[in-house]
Every structure is written in C-alpha cells, then in structure tokens.
Amino acid sequence: MKHIYTLGFTQKTAQEFFELLKKNGIEFVIDIRLNNTSQLAAFAKYPDIKYFLKAICNIEYIHDTVFSPTEEIMKNYKSKKTDWQQYKIDFDELLMQRNIENYIKEKYTLNKNICLLCSEAEPERCHRLLIAEKFTEVFKDIKIIHL
C-alpha cells in the first residue's frame, strides 16, 4: 500500500522536522501554504526550506498554491468569522472550482513518497488533512500518515 504523508512545522525544532522526513523516506515535499515566505516560519521559510530539504535530506520541494485556501477563506477562519465546519465547506467549494481531482491526476503520481507541508502542528484543523483526503479519492489504495 502506498502512503501520502502530511507534516506541520509549528512546534517542531528543525532537527525534529528534518529527522521525521528522513526517517519516513520522504522524497518530495509539496508546500501547500498560501504564504511560504513569512519570517515567522523560521527554517520553513522559502527559499530556505527548499535549500534545507535538498541539502539535509536530498528531498525535492515544490510550492503548490492550487492546494491552498484563498486569503479570504483563511482570514474568515483565523478571525473566527467561520468555524471549522464552514471552513471545510468553503474550502471544498474552492477545490471543486479548481477541479482538484483532475489536477492531482495530471500533476502528481505516487511513485515517490510525497509529504504535504503546512504550518499547523496538528492535522485535525488544517487544510493539509483535506488535501490528503483528496489524494485518497484520486489514488484509491493509499493511506494518510501524519508525521
């Protein structure tokens, strides 16, 4: 069985973060954050993250905002204008508009160990879980593993 991995960098040291990726044989990181250049992201700030992944772990990196929420969806959720249930509805609508299943089929294969990267420490209220679930809809025989 193949896997799709997810990882949030918040509340992890650089050592913990990169060791998790190495230990799980990750070969390709898809950064699904809308903004990957925030100074608050420390070692996970672009372009540093791309360099660190390659230099430390020999992992390829791509920033793919097709998997990101819009600024409006994020703002509404972070300001508590919408709750998690509404966030999921809004995000799912956005993914339908983006024809996400076809996008995944056309752009990605699971011939490498892929990890979806976001900032949230836990996946339960992070869009990386929702994206990982979309991958399971496209590639039927895969399991989601949260690092």
Image (cartoon, grey):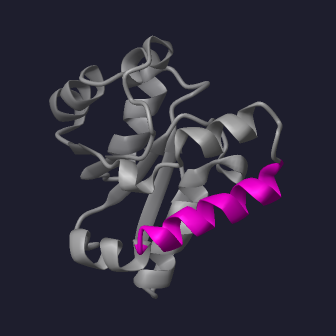
Residue at position x 44%, y 18% from top? 38
| Residue in front for this viewpoint, 60 or 125 | 125
Residue 88 appears in which quarter of the rendering?
A: bottom right
Quadrant containing the N terminus is: bottom left
| Residue in front for this viewpoint, 2 or 39 | 39
Vertical side of 58 occupied by 102: above or below:
below
Q: Which x, y percent locates residue 30?
A: 33, 49
Q: Tell me, yes or no, whether the highlighted magenta stretch contains residue 88.
A: yes
Residue at position x 42%, y 46% from top? 32
User: Which residue extends farthest bottom?
Assistant: 140
Vertical side of 15 occupied by 72: above or below:
below
Q: Which x, y percent locates residue 27?
A: 24, 52
Residue 86 appears in which quarter of the rendering?
A: bottom right
Q: Tell me, yes or no, whether the highlighted magenta stretch contains residue 47.
A: no
| Residue in front for this viewpoint, 105 or 66 | 66
Residue at position x 59%, y 52% from top? 127
User: Magenta residues?
Assistant: 83-99
